[in-house]
Image (tube, rainbow, N blue to C red):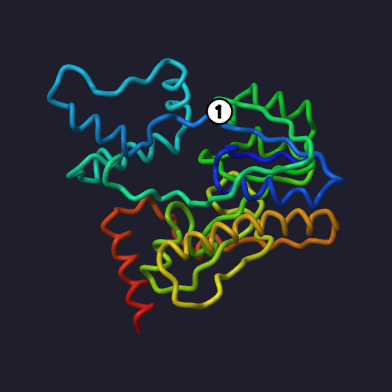
Amino acid sequence: MKIVIIGLKNHPATIKLLNKLTIFPQHTFYLLQPIKIPYSPKEIAYLIRKNSQQDTIGIKINRFYANLLFHNPGFILKLAYYLHFNKFNDNPQQTENSEEYETTDKLSISYPLYEKYVQNVNSKKTESWLKNIGPDLIICSSNGSIIRKNIIVIPRIGIINTHPGILPKYRGMNPIEYTILNGDPIGATTYFIDEGIDTGKILFTTLLESGKFSYNDVKKRILDILVDSNVRAIELIETGKFESSTQKLNAGKQYFPIDRELIAICRCKLAQKKID
């Protein structure tokens, strides 16, 4: 099969996945890398607020990144959220704990990997590049953009994503944190992407084993589940005997970016659980 991985080569999830793909020498792999905006929505919102009384904003975004930013609906939604609903006492670059998964793994692959950088995963240029390849399958590894119909229809089999939450109950942003707050089982869902947000047909769900974990432990274990689930999805699909189930769309909620105060509560809840 021709398989395209969407993700950044320096992202922990992508590093782990690319390393594991060595077990598939029969397939050809491509890496589609959406170039990341050099500032997060939270950082931009903070700088806009901080400099709102001055003549200039203390941030420079060149035309390339400006074009990328304003063609990224997810980025704009997050920026609007932080501008209107979240308060900053300090610079988030200095005080915010990273919400990214962490790993010490290094990229070590022996197979040929064909790479492509794009400004927008949904652009006509990306669409043309994918059509020229004719992929059988696309795997989302570390993609922050909503994938549109023009890209969804290209791969022969479909686009696979593993969501760090149990679907359909926990759609959207920060599903791990909201799951912890609600006291529900933590896990991930591997599904085919459709035109909705986390609404596609489900391949399988993987639960985190029960245990007394810290917040950082949970994040690391979920990272491993995300990577292993993508590998398992390839194994299932190449057999041709996989099954998928349609989600009940009214059975879940759409969650939005979480306040850092609530993340602190998540940490406390898990820390207390380790003590009990």
Using the rendered view, name the quadrant where residue 276 is placed. bottom left
Viewer-closest of 190 and 227 = 227
Viewer-closest of 64 and 94 = 94
Instruction: Give the number of marks.
Output: 1
Q: Position of residue 266 (x, y in %)?
A: 34, 65
Using the rendered view, name the quadrant where residue 45 is placed. top left
Q: Left or right: 18 with respect to 64?
A: right
Q: Is residue 116 above or below residue 240?
A: above
User: Quick one: label 1, few (<14), some, or many (20+) residues within 10 Å?
Assistant: many
Q: Residue at x 20, y 45 (%)?
A: 87
Q: Left or right: 106 with respect to 136?
A: left
Quadrant occupied by the N terminus: top right
Q: Residue at x 49, y 64 (%)?
A: 169
What residue is shown with label 1? 120
Q: Position of residue 247 (x, y in %)?
A: 60, 61
Q: Position of residue 153 (x, y in %)?
A: 71, 38
Using the rendered view, name the quadrant where residue 191 is placed. bottom right
Q: Position of residue 31 (x, y in %)?
A: 68, 35
| Residue kind at label 1, given as amino acid type | Asn
Viewer-closest of 66 and 112 = 112
Question: Which residue is most to the bottom?
Answer: 276
Q: Is residue 118 above or below residue 248?
A: above
Question: Which residue is most to the left?
Answer: 53
Label 1 sits on a secondary structure element that is loop
Q: Residue at x 76, y 62 (%)?
A: 243
Q: Left or right: 186 with respect to 237?
A: left
